[in-house]
Amino acid sequence: MFGQTLYVQWKWNRDFLAFYTFVAFTAPLIILWVALPHLGLSSARELVRIGGVVGIAIAVISVCAGMTVAWQGYGVDERVGHMYALSLPLTRTQALGMRAAAALALLSVPAMGVWVGSVLAAGQVALPASLHSYAGSLAGRALLAAWLAHACIFALRYSAGRRAKVVLFALAIGVGSLGFATEAVPGARSTIVRAAEFLISNPGPFGVFFGRWTLIDV
Amino acid sequence: MSNRLLTLLAIGVAFAPAHAVSAQAASRDADSLLRRIRALDSAVMTRSRSVDSIRRMLVRPIPNVDIREGPIHVRTDATLAPRVRNAVSSVVEMIDRRGGTLVASRASAHVAVIRRDSTRSIVGMLPVIAIDADTTTRWSMIGERQVRAPASASAIANGLAAIVEQRAVQGVDSALAAWIMVGRAPLRPASAVEAADAYVEYATTESAVVRRCRARDISACLDALGVDSAAGSRLDRWYSVDDYRALVRFAAPAREDSAAVAAWIRCPRDREDAACAIAARALPNARVPLPLSASVRFGFLREVLEAGGVGAFDRLVATPGTVRDRLAAAANEPLDRTVRRWLDRLEGSRPHRMSIDATLVAASLGWSALILGLAVIRRTSWA
């Protein structure tokens, strides 16, 4: 049953996955190709900066890949009238669980693209002894970020249904209001800042998004 | 009618209109005077407000709570007093541990004021806790420090300690002040961020002398830190030909030297090594950038003071001679040993920013599973 779900997910998402894998593979190569021979950036400090640009590009690609796979899966359900295989001996929970697991497996494909592209790109650069390339760490972060982004959008779409956009908008307004409140209501500032720091730091839910993303570092 | 009566009548007729005209003129004069008085009143009110404002600025009421511990004397208000007491205690402890008699005497010569204040923000005014270096704010060389309210005792202590650090360097001789560069003494311990930044700079600086320093050439380290000056120009001592391209990104030749400026433009654009060399060689000796920044130098001074313990700063200021002699006297040991320890500490502060530790993996997977689980167990319809 899981194999069938995986196959169906693959059929639905293969175009997007191919696109994101291709972009994730080529982004490090293209950025280093532009920065090194064309812009002439070759000092250690500049290499660290370029590595950061590669890292940010990979972060964006990973999050987009995770969100797209989740959004696409629900989009198919929506188009066919929110039906699932009632004829199969599966509960909704089991079907959704399989679908989520299949999506997580598929998201390892762009992460592989990140790893291969980063290894090839780092191999083209003569790094000073004080610098290191972090292709494996970058790919690992990309995988974790893609899974987390997928989980967030999956939860949003399967919980909120057609109200997903409204919920997303309300969340954006809420976050913006809290940002405004840090200035407008000084008494609440420390609480809001502490909460935000928890959300975006390591044991927090979005720590992987806001950590260090770079291909080349000290 | 007699002539006499006619004459009186004529006089009466002649004066009657004259009286009316005079009354109108008097009324106009009164209006004009009133307007003038009002204008002057308005000016006086405006000026008095300005005078009040200046008076308040010059002679602000001093808060009534007096906190005195060791060399630190602070005035604050009753609401801030408990936190300020804790802050003062930690600053006194810092002075005892890392300062000395000089730091203590300079700190004790002034009365800091800690009070509530406000500052402009993008949405109106924001409450802050202002830390003034002295009661006579206007005459203090050290600017007011502000901590966002509500502030913890450690945040207030940090602001107060920064003022003590600045106060410690005030009045030191120009040679030492020029070497320190940052205008304060490193009495507080380095934060993790400062240590990581120092390592990143040490590891990524394109400079021959820093590379030699990394290879444990102590004299190169001292040269890079500006402690010892070896013979030769700065360019030859600090940078090799391979570093010129990176160097000319930060320094430009004098604009009068058109050939050098043209080479400076060609160096990054055409990646011509010869052009980079021309641009670098055209830099006046004084404009060749220091290989290590003031913050790294500050970190080294911190190492020196830590090595010297209590009284190290006193010895640094009081010892005559070169900067090297003074640092060695402050550290109370041969400077080579201090440099080696500083290098060890610097190497040890390498930040592992890209490592994926187990916590990150567990937290990321756990939160993903939790979010997915919440969606999956929802029992309502798919729509």
Image: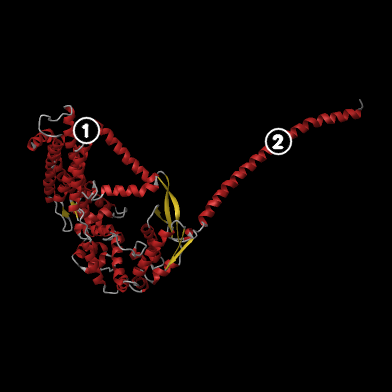
Instruction: Please provide percent x and percent y for residue A23.
Output: 15, 40
Whether labels 2 and 1 share one chain? yes
Relative height, residue A20 to residue A137 (above, below): above
Instruction: Please provide percent x and percent y for residue B159.
Output: 38, 59
10 Å crowding of disc 2: few (<14), some (14-19), many (20+): few
Q: Which residue is mark 1?
A: B380
Q: Residue at x 59, y 45 (%)?
A: B43
Q: Earlier in the sequence, mark 2 or mark 1?
A: 2
Q: Residue at x 56, y 46 (%)?
A: B46
Q: Is residue B23 visible?
A: yes
Relative height, residue B310 to residue B279 (above, below): below
Q: Could you tell me the amino acid type at mark 2?
A: Ser
Q: How is the image coloured?
A: secondary structure
Left/right of residue B279 with respect to residue B47 in the rendered view: left
Specify the quadrant of the image occupied by residue B186.
Answer: bottom left
The answer for how far apart the CA atoms under marks 2 and 1 are is: 88 Å
Instruction: Please provide percent x and percent y for residue B234.
Output: 26, 63
* Chain letter of the residue carrying label 2: B
Q: Is residue A57 visible?
A: no
SS class, disc 1: loop
* Chain letter of the residue carrying label 1: B
Q: Residue at x 24, y 71 (%)?
A: B337
Q: Residue at x 80, y 30 (%)?
A: B16
Left/right of residue B238 with respect to residue B91 in the rendered view: left
Give whichever of B167, B237 is nearer the camera.
B167
Give whichever of A72, B344 is nearer the camera.
A72
Q: Could you tell me the amino acid type at mark 1?
A: Thr
Q: Which mark is residue B332?
A: none
Q: Which residue is mark 2?
A: B27
Specify the quadrant of the image occupied by residue B96.
Answer: bottom left
Q: Residue furthest top?
A: B1
